[in-house]
Image (cartoon, grey):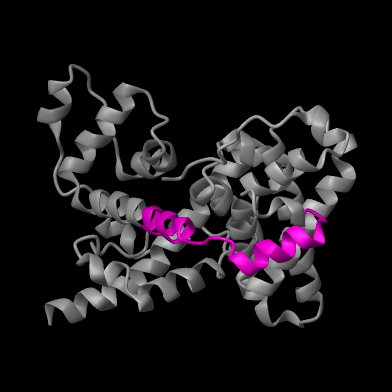
Amino acid sequence: MNHEHDHQPQQHNHEHSHDYGHDHQLSCKDILTNLNAYIDGELDNALCRDIETHIKSCPNCRIVVNTLKKTIQLYQMDGQETMLPDEARHRLMSRLDLDDYVAKE
Amino acid sequence: MNENINQQEISLEALQRKDKAAFAQLVAQNSDHIYRLALKMLGNPQDAEDILQETFIKAFNNIDGFEGRSKVSTWLYRIAVNESLSLLRKRKDNLTSIDAGLETDDGDILPKQIIDWCCLPERELISDEARHYITEAIDTLSDANRATFLLRDVEGLSTREAAKVLDISESAVKVRLMRARMQLRESLTDFFANKLAKESA
């Protein structure tokens, strides 16, 4: 992958990790491994902090995380706007022999 | 956002004695979700409506066999996903291998394009053209990955619920979701990077 070279931290963040009192230097690969769980808020606090520390100092990972979040958000917005059209709802209720209940909803 | 089906408790006992009011309530609570899932799976409103009807007819006919070990909504999703996948298989049987490439997105999940398009103005992100592209991009996912993405990220099911719907392990859900998300990110980057270049030109 040609991005492999690009997708490296721009600088190492020793200061940040020492701030947190432990020495978990995450690589970009570690970020990718945990990306789903990070975005879904499923990681424990310590790992979450390490990822955020890495992201602060690594523009490439930051871009991947942000564009991935935005991608999901755009699909969620698109989904929320998709509703069953009224005519189709009526045909459904009719097919299910539930016409009597249409007006109640 | 990403709300799960908002279940007002419907009595399973009422459904199983084919109580019409209970069934109408079930339909009212779930029809938007099932329709949306089918529409995004199939990309066609008529097919989505057919799947919607089939799902509730099957649910109505088979409610006796539903043991209540999962939520009714999960069970409905399962019927709808299976019906959708079955229709997609039929469609493919009618084609030659033209779309074989669509099934091979199981490559790695490494990001290829690192371009920050999040800074684009909102009007660009939700323009009609963008929305059309977003809708089409999801069709390039494999059926399995698309179903997983829709259940988790659009319908808001948990990993566990999605695993039940798809009858796969939770770790398989996670792998599929990651592939789907990363592939969609690349697709949207293709599109929005172009817009970004025009914005800054």
Residue B69 picture location, percent across and down: 76, 27
In the rendered view of the protein, which quadrant contains the C terminus of chain B? bottom left
Could you say which is closer to the camera, residue A23 or residue B18?
B18
As drawn, A103 above or below B92? above
Answer left or right for A25 relative to A32: left
Q: Residue at left 43%, top 54%?
A: A76
With B184 as the anchor, is B4 left or right in this view?
A: right
Residue A98 appears in the rendering: yes
Q: What main secondary structure does the magenta stretch of the protein show?
A: helix
Q: Where B49 sits versus A13, above or below? A: below
For the magenta stretch, what is the residue range?
A: A71-98
Choose between A102 and B121: the one closer to the eye.
Answer: A102
Q: Which residue is depicted at the point 15% across and 39% down? A: A12
Give the percent coordinates (x, y) of residue B27. 69, 48
Q: Is residue A37 left or right of residue A57?
A: right
Q: Is residue B84 visible?
A: no
> For residue B85, which quarter of the picture?
bottom right
Q: Hey, which residue is sitting farthest left in the picture?
A: A15
In percent of width and height, residue B155 lies at 54, 48
Quadrant for residue B129, please give it. bottom left
Magenta-drawn stretch contains A73: yes
Q: Residue at x 25, y 64 (%)?
A: B115
Which quadrant of the view contains residue B40? Answer: bottom right
- Residue at the spot 28% in from the left edge and 58% down from the top edge: A5
On screen, residue B71 above or below B108: above
Give the quarter of the figure containing the N terminus of chain B: top left
User: In the image, is residue B28 part of the stretch drawn in magenta?
Assistant: no
Q: Point out residue A55 in the picture as x, y percentages from the top left corner.
A: 22, 42
Q: Is B14 located above or below residue B179 in the figure? A: above
